[in-house]
Image (spheres, helix red, strand yellow):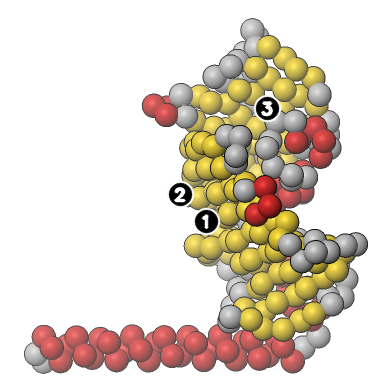
């Protein structure tokens, strides 16, 4: 076989494989569209419930009109509400950590040798994180798993190869785009009563481990406030048996109670 013929054969095989994948995806989409929307929502919740903990490493970047920056981090997460993120700045400098649980939060700024502690309500969290995120939403941001309401959606359709579930909660509309192959939420959008976007999250670069899926890249954007947080995992382990939430605070650190 000549080199040209080999290339043609390879291209044909690739085209057949892509066509097969597309047909399989379309079949999955059609199958799920024929079922009640609650069936898809239940599959998403069941898959998400299969991941109890995460450990990983990566980088996080944030942008806002007031400030911007990036850092490397190591993470331990255990659902429903335990999170420890240790940050490392340039040249391996210990930049601090963030610990969250259902009872308290602890934030240590290594550059200023300052620690902030308090109750994990939304007001307290906003005092040190420049994003309007609750404890649950912070956990979702780092895990890439966005919770679907346990109620009937107002709308159920397909869009751009994904399945769309839409819910009305108060004066806000919550939309979830779901990949039919792995039932992962790949896009989440919150709109206000004026139809303006309040929050948009995307999840991509999916990894698979023992039949479970999680995204390596998560981005959360607040369009009206021109704020964004982006997380990228260079390594990620699902259902790590014993994630450690141990942390240490220097005795001479300045303490602020919220």
Could you say where residue 215 lies in the image, as x and y percent from the top left? 56, 59
> Which numbered disc, 2 or 3, marks the residue that appears first in the sequence?
3
The answer to whether 250 appears left or right of 235 in the picture is: right
Q: Is residue 64 something that shows in the picture?
A: yes
Res. 77 mark: none
Q: Secondary structure at mark 1?
A: strand
Q: Is residue 154 above or below residue 193?
A: below
Q: Is residue 73 something that shows in the picture?
A: no
Q: Nearer the viewer, residue 141 or 181?
A: 141
- Which residue occupies 58% across, 81% down? 161
Task: Specify the quadrant of the image occupied by residue 158.
Answer: bottom right
> Which numbered disc, 3 or 1, marks the residue that appears first in the sequence?
3
Res. 216 mark: 1
Gap in angstroms between the C-alphas marked 3 and 1:
24 Å
Q: Is residue 217 above or below residue 35?
A: above
Could you say where residue 55 lies in the image, as x and y percent from the top left? 58, 45
Q: Nearer the viewer, residue 39 or 61?
A: 61
Q: Quadrant of the N terminus?
A: bottom left
Q: Secondary structure at mark 3?
A: strand
> Which numbered disc, 1 or 2, marks the residue that appears first in the sequence?
1
| Circle 2/circle 3 CB separation < 8 Å | no
Res. 234 mark: 2
| Circle 3/circle 1 CB separation < 8 Å | no
Q: Secondary structure at mark 2?
A: strand
Residue, far left: 2
Could you say where residue 212 lies in the image, as x and y percent from the top left? 60, 65
Task: Specify the quadrant of the image occupied by residue 125.
Answer: top right
From the image, tell me which residue sits under label 3: 107
Gap in angstroms between the C-alphas marked 2 and 3:
24 Å
């Amino acid at each position: 076989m000549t080199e040209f013929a080999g290339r043609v054969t390879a291209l044909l095989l690739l085209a057949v494989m892509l066509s097969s994948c597309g047909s399989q995806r379309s079949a999955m989409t059609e199958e799920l569209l024929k079922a009640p929307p609650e069936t898809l929502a239940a599959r998403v919740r069941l898959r998400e419930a299969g991941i109890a903990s995460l450990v990983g490493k990566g980088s996080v970047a944030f942008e806002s009109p007031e400030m911007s920056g990036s850092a490397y981090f190591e993470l331990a997460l255990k659902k429903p509400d335990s999170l420890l993120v240790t940050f490392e700045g340039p040249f391996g400098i210990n930049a601090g950590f963030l610990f969250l649980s259902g009872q308290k939060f602890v934030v240590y700024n290594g550059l200023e040798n300052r620690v902030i502690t308090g109750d994990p309500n939304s007001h307290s969290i906003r005092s040190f994180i420049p994003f309007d995120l609750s404890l649950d939403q912070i956990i979702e941001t780092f895990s890439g798993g966005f919770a679907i309401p346990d109620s009937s959606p107002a709308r159920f359709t397909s869009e751009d190869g994904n399945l769309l579930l839409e819910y009305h909660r108060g004066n806000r509309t919550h939309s979830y785009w779901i990949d039919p192959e792995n039932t992962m939420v790949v896009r989440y959008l919150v709109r206000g009563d004026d139809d303006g976007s309040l929050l948009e999250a995307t999840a991509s670069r999916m990894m698979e481990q023992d039949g479970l899926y999680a995204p390596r890249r998560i981005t959360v954007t607040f369009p009206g406030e021109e704020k964004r947080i982006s997380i990228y995992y260079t390594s990620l382990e699902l259902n790590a048996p014993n994630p450690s939430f141990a942390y240490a605070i220097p005795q001479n650190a300045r303490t602020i109670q919220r």
